[in-house]
Image: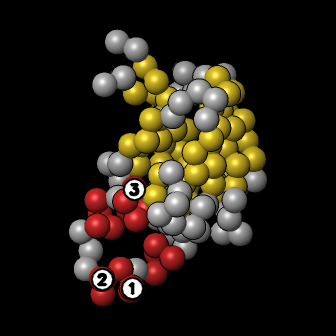
Amino acid sequence: MEKIPALVGIAGHFKDEKMVLDCGKTITVGRSRSADFSLRRCASWKNLTEEEREKDQKALTVSGKHFEVTVHSLASIEIKNLSANGIKVDGKPVERIVIEDAAEKSHTIEFGIEEKISLQMIERE
């Protein structure tokens, strides 16, 4: 089976959510509905009441468009911070990083207080 790059949520509102990445395309990740991979479209967010959403301080630490991911090739996946709150890739704060080994290993992107997404290869469905 063919493997393709994807963002897979591992913690926070994004847990268990997936976004397949296409070569040559840039996708944004964040809290805004206009983000390609949006916290507001995650099942855990949709399951909250309006009152719970208003009190969710952790969600407010995720910027509208927090970061972007561009797949140039499997040997060149660029992750760029778009937020004053910053991001970490594999535990290190970054403004911009190019992942060159996505075909061999996964990488963890942390943002907001508790959001974690894994950049990894998954089976094409």
Q: Please determine whether, in this image, residue 108 is positioned above or below residue 50.
A: above
Q: Residues within 10 Å of mark 3 (few under 14, many from 20)?
A: many
Q: Name the residue: 34% across, 12% down.
A: 1
Identify residue type, mark 1: Glu
The Cα atoms of the two marked residues, 1 and 3, are separated by 18 Å
Q: Nearer the viewer, mark 3 or mark 2?
A: 2
Helix, strand or loop status at disc 2: helix
Q: Residue furthest top?
A: 1
Helix, strand or loop status at disc 1: helix
In the image, taking residue 50 as reference, residue 18 lies left or right, namely right
- Does the rendering let one see residue 112? no
Q: Where is residue 22 in the image (x, y as percent from the top left)?
A: 53, 30
Q: Where is residue 63 in the image (x, y as percent from the top left)?
A: 58, 68
Identify residue type, mark 3: Phe
Helix, strand or loop status at disc 3: helix
Q: Label 1, on which residue? A: 54
Q: Name the residue: 58% across, 51% down.
A: 28
Q: How crowded is mark 2: few (under 14 residues within 10 Å), some or many (20 or more)?
A: few
The Cα atoms of the two marked residues, 3 and 2, are separated by 18 Å
Q: Label 3, on which residue? A: 14
Q: Label 2, on which residue? A: 50
Image disc number at residue 100: none
Q: Name the residue: 55% across, 21% down.
A: 103
Mark closest to the chain's N terminus, 3 or 2? 3
* Foreground pick, 108 / 30: 30
Q: Are marks 1 and 2 in contact (CB under 8 Å)?
A: yes
Q: Which of marks 1 and 3 is in front?
A: 1
Identify residue type, mark 2: Glu
